[in-house]
Amino acid sequence: VLASSIRSPSYYDPDVNPDAALGRWNYVLDGMVAIGALPPSERAGMKYPRVPAYREAASTDPGPTGLIKRQVLAELESLNISEQQVRTEGLKITTTIDPKVQAGVVNAATSKLEGEQKTTRTAIVSIDPETGGVRGYYGGSDGMGWDHAQAGLQTGSSFKVFALVAALEQDIPLSKVYSSSPYEATGGLTVNNSDGESCGSCNLATAMKMSLNTVYYRLMMDLDGKAQAVADAAHKAGVAESFGNIQHTLQEKNGVPEGGVVLGQYPSRVIDMASAYATLAASGIYRAPHFVQKVETSKGDVLFDRQKDPGKRVFPAKVADNVTAALGPVAAYSNGNGLSDDTYGTRPSAAKTGTAQLGDTGQNKDAWMVGYTPQLSTAVWVGTDKGIALKNAWGGPMYGSGLPAQIWKAAMDEALQGKPIKQFPEPAAVGGQAGVPYEPPPVTYTPPKSRQNDRNGRGGNNNNNNDGGSGGNLTLAPGVTIPFPGGNPRRGGNSGGNSGGNSGGDSSGDSGDTGGNGDNSGTDW
């Protein structure tokens, strides 16, 4: 076989051209018989040896980069460039992977998983919103193993973003207010908020920051198209319509999505979430994610050179930019995981957490943090590959605001370290509201200290009684008046809500705090 392929090893490679290889082999053997170098009897018994099936895994790097190589080879196949050509023709492949971003992704994955449960896994994908190029990719530590970045995984509340996109497309502004009380859905389903979280009634921006399920379920039910509008927005942003053995994503067998789509009921891939959020970072312009930038021959001839993709506008800029504004506070709100730079300080970002439950067990199984700056969109998933409950290092349930947010911050901070800070565009108005509506901060009232209570004041005692105050009203702002027990300073006593437990009944004590010290900070309203 070797002798027959010397003339043209690539052409006569049995993996590439088996018919030509067999013909050349027969030609060489027959020639050997003709010159007397091979007895005819031996020639008659010879058969072409079996060619072992090519194993793709054998050519795959064992570390995390092996999974990148797998994606690159698959993309080359779509460009009609086979792996065999890459191996035998000395092709030079330039990928979109940025070494600095890749280092940040790998370092974040490996360092943050230290000390966690042995079953915990993570996947991270970083995409350039301006090109669609994949800059960093981590599907797992084993380059010949399962690629979690390509797996279908439930996304939890990180999918609420697409309900907001659909709402803004229908001219529903961020200032729209909904109740956060439990919602009775069809089929006897009651939608609740995680851990009983509530805002009473609040606007869509506040509900996004607090990740209130009930508000966004109500919003979905107000949309033209309801659940279908959410699925359509997700698909336009970049969530794949099919992958693997899933022919149609974000829907039931009847082709219609259920209401749970707004809460991340259906599986999506990590790479798709990074891509969809990159569309928002690009003010509504979608660019397909890719790994291959350029392909050259060993002689320098260019077989493929990806040009800058102008992209496809899938949302109006004002829609995407208002979503970005609503997501702005989330990273810092998620246990202080806002981005920062050693040189430039705080870096603006837009992000959303997500957590998916493990059936009816009350446990969690998937946790997410997806977010972006104008330069980079990164999706982080944390879960297991065993279908078991996802626990943190201390054995408690894991949420998106925990380890996923920490990994996201670590990866983004390292990837963007030293890069100038870019600001997001100021959003134009949708439904009369541009950006996040102003909400005044909670008012804190500290009653003035009564001169009569410097020492044993009238009605003050160390048992927190209310002998001295007759009650009254407290005006916090024009038109805002609340009852304030003991609030009439002319009667002395407990105008701060307790006598402080010290002689004289200090009026600055915490309201309703029995036996407290008089040097506390007053009453929060």
Image (cartoon, helix red, strand yellow):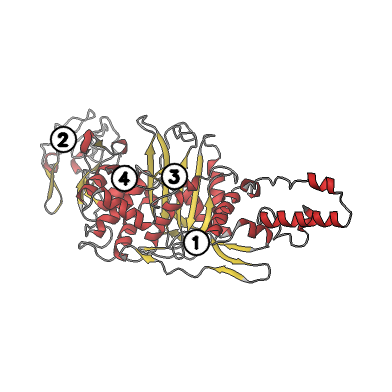
Which three-letter amino acid code belongs to the residue tagged 4? Val
Earlier along the polypeptide chain: callout 2 or callout 1?
1
Q: Nearer the viewer, residue 267 or 343?
A: 267
| Alpha carbon separation for disc pair 1 and 4 | 28 Å
In the rendering, at what x and y percent does residue 7 appear?
Answer: 77, 62
Which three-letter amino acid code belongs to the residue tagged 1? Gly
Location of residue 101 by image quarter:
bottom right
- Residue placed under numbered mark 3 in the picture: 245
| Alpha carbon separation for disc pair 1 and 3 | 25 Å
| Alpha carbon separation for disc pair 4 and 3 | 19 Å
| Alpha carbon separation for disc pair 2 and 1 | 74 Å
In the rendering, at what x and y percent does residue 227 appear?
Answer: 26, 48
Closer to the eye: label 4 or 3? 3
Q: Which mark is residue 133?
A: 1
Q: Nearer the viewer, residue 488 or 42?
A: 42
Earlier along the polypeptide chain: callout 4 or callout 2?
4
**Label 3 Cα crowd, 10 Å radius (few <14 / some 14-19 / many 20+):** few
Name the residue located 29 percent from the left edge and 64 percent from the top edge.
318
In the rendering, at what x and y percent does residue 486 appear?
Answer: 14, 38
In the rendering, at what x and y percent does residue 303 appear?
Answer: 59, 68
Secondary structure of the residue carrying tag 2 is loop
Closer to the eye: label 1 or 3? 3
- Residue placed under numbered mark 4 in the picture: 261
- Residue placed under numbered mark 2 in the picture: 458
